[in-house]
Image (cartoon, grey):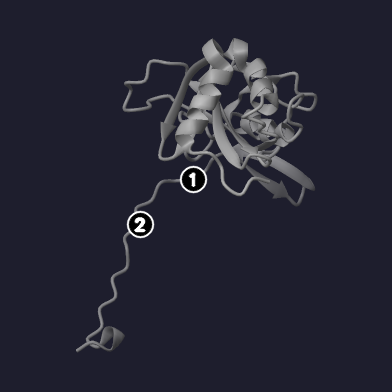
Amino acid sequence: MTDFAISPEALQTQIAETLGAKAKSVTLALGEVTVVVGAADYLEVATLLRDAPGCQFEQLMDLCGLDYVDYREGEWEGERFCVASHLLSVSLNQRVRLKVFVPNEDLPVIDSLTGIWSAAGWFEREAFDLYGIVFDGHDDLRRILTDYGFIGHPFRKDFPVSGHVEMRYDAEQKRVIYQPVSIEPREITPRVIREDNYGGLH
């Protein structure tokens, strides 16, 4: 492993030269390089970032969904859903963020990265579960955090804070059941403690 990575500016240049027109943008902010690509180039770019000299991002460290609805107070005009991946080059000691915006808000489908980095499997299941993003080519795409019968995708910004249904174990039926949410809003008033000698102060 290299003791010192190249500068973020040099990495930005290296990635821009490697990807060429396949990258919509290669930006640098807060010392981090972010690459944005189109859905059609997603797999090809991911493969280049893994294999190309000067890149060699052998490891997928994280992958998550993002919901851009109401982003920047409604000024956002792009696609609603995005997939962001964080890649690590162990051999070159460098990192990059790869972002792709998912076409079609009503049925968000994007290629799976599992054929390039097998670690994408569970991360993509999480993004599917929480955002409803479908990963084409994933061989086991099912919920991973919520129950299989769960309705909706709880990290979408339009998902109600209290949810639609609640789940509980019914002792009589000896199984888990679902029922409409019965949480009633209540006003919580903070308790104020006043002591003459609080904390040893006079």
Q: Position of residue 138 (x, y in %)?
A: 75, 23
Q: Write the residue at 73% across / 44% down.
A: 176
Q: Write the residue at 34% across / 53% down.
A: 187
Q: Position of residue 196 (x, y in %)?
A: 22, 86
Q: Quick one: SS at disc 2?
A: loop
Q: Quadrant of the C terminus?
A: bottom left
Inspect the image, locate mark 2, and give the three-letter code of the amino acid beneath it.
Ile
**Front-lying residue, 53 or 193:** 53
Identify the residue position indicated by label 1 in the image: 183
Q: Looking at the image, is 148 positioned above or below residue 104?
A: below
How many badges with numbers are in the image? Answer: 2
**Front-lying residue, 170 or 63:** 63
Identify the residue position indicated by label 2 in the image: 188
Q: Residues within 10 Å of mark 1 (few under 14, many from 20)?
A: few
Q: Write the residue at 38% across / 15% down.
A: 77
Q: Which one is earlier in the sequence, the residue at label 2 or at label 1? A: 1
Residue ranking furthest to the left:
202
Disc ID at residue 123: none
Q: Position of residue 116 (x, y in %)?
A: 74, 26
Q: Quick one: SS at disc 1?
A: loop
Q: Write the residue at 44% across / 27% down.
A: 27
Q: Residues within 10 Å of mark 2 (few under 14, many from 20)?
A: few
Q: Looking at the image, is 194 positioned above or below residue 96?
A: below
Q: Is residue 114 left or right of residue 166?
A: right
For residue 102, what is the image quadrant?
A: top right
Q: Is residue 181 left or right of residue 187?
A: right
- Nearer the observer: mark 2 or 1; the answer is 2
Distance from disc 2 to disc 1, alpha carbons, whole Å, reads: 14 Å
Q: Looking at the image, is 92 positioned above or below residue 38?
A: below
**Front-lying residue, 23 or 10:** 10
Q: Is residue 120 visible?
A: yes
